[in-house]
Image (tube, rainbow, N blue to C red):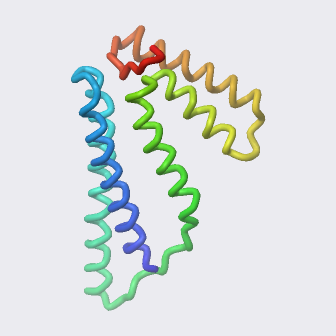
Amino acid sequence: MKQYMQDRYIAAIGLLLTVGGLWLCTYYESDSALFPRICLCCIGFLLALLGVESFLTQKRLAAAGKSGETSLPMNWGPFLIVTLALAVYGAALVILGFYSSSIVFLLAVGFLWKGVKKPTIIIFTVCFQIFLYICFTVLFNVPLPKGFLI
């Protein structure tokens, strides 16, 4: 597979997930949806640029008479697992709320990540949640998605 084709697949899958994430934002209160919408729009913009660049690269290579570089074999398993985990996290925001779903997500990713000690994962999760609380709630007063647990 050529590198520009691999970039197109990544851009297409990412844009579909971005649209799904924007759709999930309709379940949030209007104030709570602002931050995720901004993040998703930025991600979508970057993915669209990746897709456009793949077409421009193909045209440049064709004009130069080159076939293009063969991409390194991509291990799609971890990519799809991370993508699915992020989609589940986005859906969990509606049900569990921001803080609860973030704790579950960080713990799950940490325990799935091989080579990291469990106490380190727990300490990082707690510290990161304190950081998020101070940044979003105390300093910036950002309304975040609230689930039934908060």
Name the residue nearer the viewer: 57 or 45: 45
135 versus 54 height, above or below = above
Residue positioned 40% across, 17% down in the render:
136
The image position of residue 91, as x and y in percent, is: 40, 37
116 relative position to 14: left or right: right
Residue positioned 47% across, 43% down in the render:
86
The image position of residue 87, as x and y in percent, is: 43, 44
97 relative position to 114: left or right: left
Residue positioned 34% across, 11% down in the render:
141
Q: Outermost residue toward the top?
A: 138
User: Dividing the image into 4 quarters, which one contains the C terminus?
Assistant: top left
40 relative position to 129: left or right: left
The image position of residue 20, as x and y in percent, is: 31, 46
Residue positioned 46% across, 37% down in the render:
89
Q: Quadrant of residue 52?
A: bottom left
Name the residue nearer the viewer: 139 or 104: 104
Q: Outermost residue toward the bottom?
A: 65
96 versus 80 height, above or below = above
73 relative position to 123: left or right: left
Q: Quadrant of residue 148?
A: top left
The image position of residue 60, as x and y in percent, is: 28, 79
Q: How many marks do you count on the picture?
A: 0
